Image (cartoon, rainbow, N blue to C red):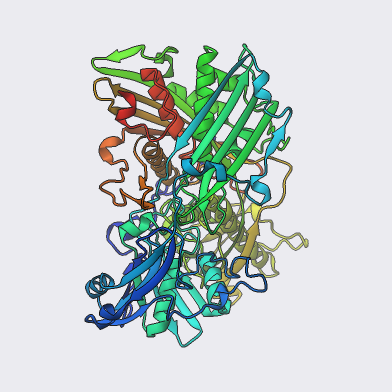
Amino acid sequence: MEKEFFFDKKKNDPISRVDSRAKVTGRATYAAEHKMQNTVYGFLVGSTIAKGRIKSIDTNSAQKAPGVLAVLTHLNAPKLLGYETGKDPSKPPTAGQPLRIFYNNEIVYYDQPIALVIADTYERVLHAAKLVKAEYEKSEHQTDLHANKGKAKKPSGPRAEDYNRGEIDGYKNAAVKIEQQYYHPVEVHNPMELGSIIAHWEGKDKVTVYTKTQGVEATKKSIGDAFRLAAENITVNAEHIGGAFGMGLRTWPYEIAAIMGAQKVGRPLKLVLHREQMFTNVGYRPVTVQKIGMGATPEGKLVGITHEATANTSSYEEFTEATVNITQFMYACPNLTTRYRLVPLNVCTPIWMRGPGEATGSFALESAMDELAYQLKLDPIEFRLRNHADKDPEKNLPWSSKYLKECYQMGAEKIGWQARKLEPRAIADGDWLVGYGMGTGSFGAMRWVATVKGRLEADGKLLLQCSVNDMGPGTATMMTAVAAEVMGIVPANIKIQMGSTKLPPGPMQGGSNVTSTVGSAVHDVCIALKEQMAALLGKEGSPFHRGNGQPIKVEDLTFSEGIVSLKNSDSVKVAYSDLLKQHKLPALEITKESKGGQQPYSMYSFSVHFVKLRVHQPTGRIKIDHVVSCADAGTIISPKTAASQMIGGAVGGIGMALMEDLVVDHRFGRPINNNLADYHVPVNADIPQVDVLFVNKKDPYLNPMGSKGLGEIALVGMAPAIANAVFNATGKRIRELPITPDKLI
Ligand code: MOS
């Protein structure tokens, strides 16, 4: 392992989460917790049919109920300028909100909002919402992917194009091959924090919102587009987010409704979704059927892979994800074909969820790799090593860094892989069968654009500001760790302000980009502050002045404990506060934009997940004994929060593999288990020892810290590792998630 670059030097210990005290004491404020005078409460009434029209809607009793201020429906809601379609009525509305809330009487999915009731207390609004009555003219809905596979069509856009290298469906000519179909159902994000917003207007054209979003800038743009407001008149705040897993990656109609409602009553309006509405109105992982054809030589060299996926979208919008893309670069394979299709259904539009398409795609790909390895009588790790891609076979570029082989090795050792038997059902422990499995994960290593403002006060305290927010992984901690390292100050002297569009613009928190993007900006700002210091020091009259016209270089300058000194020189030192005084400055300050450039490298993070589990033969119950997750995510900046994130990914993967399944009653087009009692997610008792290992080697190209992304690879490859371990234990290959006991007996 290389030296860990980022840690609290004072304690010689990894940095701890900087906002943990605020979170455990309740001082961290989430969207719905902001206090505003005169706040009113909104509640959405949803459609009880999945497709058709509202024939009539009776809001009279609701209007007359105690405390009710207004009821908004398609009959009286303001017509948002952004809802217009422009010149071409067949095109989506200009605001990018294809589901135009309260726009007309059309119903396109079950629980689509048909009314917003507004009252002075939460209890009164809940009561009044029950009094809204609608009559519908139903038409035939479609919510079943299987029944509608014939309607599958190619999505538009380059990302979902059919892909081919070598011979089309070249796997068919291989000596050893498999052809299988894999399936996973709809899964729902279900973060602890419900979808929540407080909206408040000042006058007619100035709005402030506190909302649950993974990107305040993106939400600001959506609000501007829908309401046609100038950017400077919109403030979006979202400092703390109670989990999101992808559901906060867009602005949903409920947020638009709340802003409309606040405008209508001229008071701050708070709208918190009910848990049931979290299952129907804010996206989910789409149901996907995948087919894999995979062939190899008898020596275990891949000849070809064909990977096809058919997923659902909504009837009003195309949502695509990178389900088949992972197969294009994961292994050295000469003949590669992928196809991706969509089936529109009468449901809310899906959205990225936890490792999105790569998690879905890796379930099929890594299960198929395990199946073919077994047919070849090869250890699954050995099979992967024989087909290791030394360079990116899709882009035909070298990797910026790739330590996947190290992950295989570290993880195999930790889980005790040598105890695994090639033949299934070979290890028994009383009534239990024991098995080992593994799966590989990967996700693009991104770097987007961020602007950070840094201000270094005379007392040595550093303030960093960026609008980026944190849905949990520890963004502020990462920013603190980078600044502590680059600036040479202790974490306790660093203050982070984030999560508001009043601050310099940062990226969305998604796609595992934030550490790379915002960390780089923090790095650059700290270097720029040091450059300012160097410039002051180099001026005539300074004890550092060299008199030879040579500027002082940042690399030669050390800033520690408020003292500026030159490296390798004990004699030249000055207190930072004296330096400022000398130049009559209150502080040093800079705002800087930072972004990555095009590079001739292919950039990905990699992970390998190992699972040891046991299956109870009489009941089919699965007990996971041990999980080992290894990541190649470049330099690990904050080991504690990084390890937490990996554990979270493992938990998500266990849910995906064993429990999560939104059951839809297709007769009515609505979910049955739309609550956390019936929609199963892992609880503490389901989670075994999870060991997290990091290769922790620098990526030389992506960003100055040498880090790569971590969020998605924590989960990508986890579900197939479990499915593969179930096969190793029982000899049963389960290709339909979730792997519930009934499938094993
Ligand atoms: Mo993530 S699925 O980019 O929140």
Quarter of the picture containing the C terminus is top left
The picture quadrant where one finds residue 43 is bottom left
Q: Is residue 114 above or below residue 609?
A: below
Determine the residue located farthest toward the right in the rendered image.
549
The percent coordinates of residue 367 (x first, y second) are 49, 27
Q: Closest to the observer: 199 or 66? A: 66
Location of residue 640 with respect to 487 vertically, above or below: above
On screen, residue 225 above or below 305: below
- Residue drawn 24% across the image and 21% down it: 618
Residue 524 at x, y = what percent?
A: 62, 58
Which residue is found at the position 40% from the left and 76% from the top?
73
Question: In the image shown, does 83 or 413 lie closer to the viewer?
Answer: 83
Q: Say left or right for 559 vs 490.
A: right
Q: Within the image, what quadrant is residue 533 found in?
A: bottom right
- Kindly tell me whether residue 219 is visible in this rendering: yes
- Left or right: where does residue 531 sit relative to residue 744? right
The residue lying toward the viewer, choosing from 729 and 1, is 729
Question: x%, y% of residue 541?
Answer: 67, 70
Residue 232 coordinates in the image, percent (x, y): 56, 79
| Residue located 42% across and 41% down the image | 185
Q: How many marks?
A: 0
> Which of these two is toward me, 233 or 470?
233
Residue 708 is at least partly visible in this image: no
Vertical comparison of 722 with 529: above or below:
above
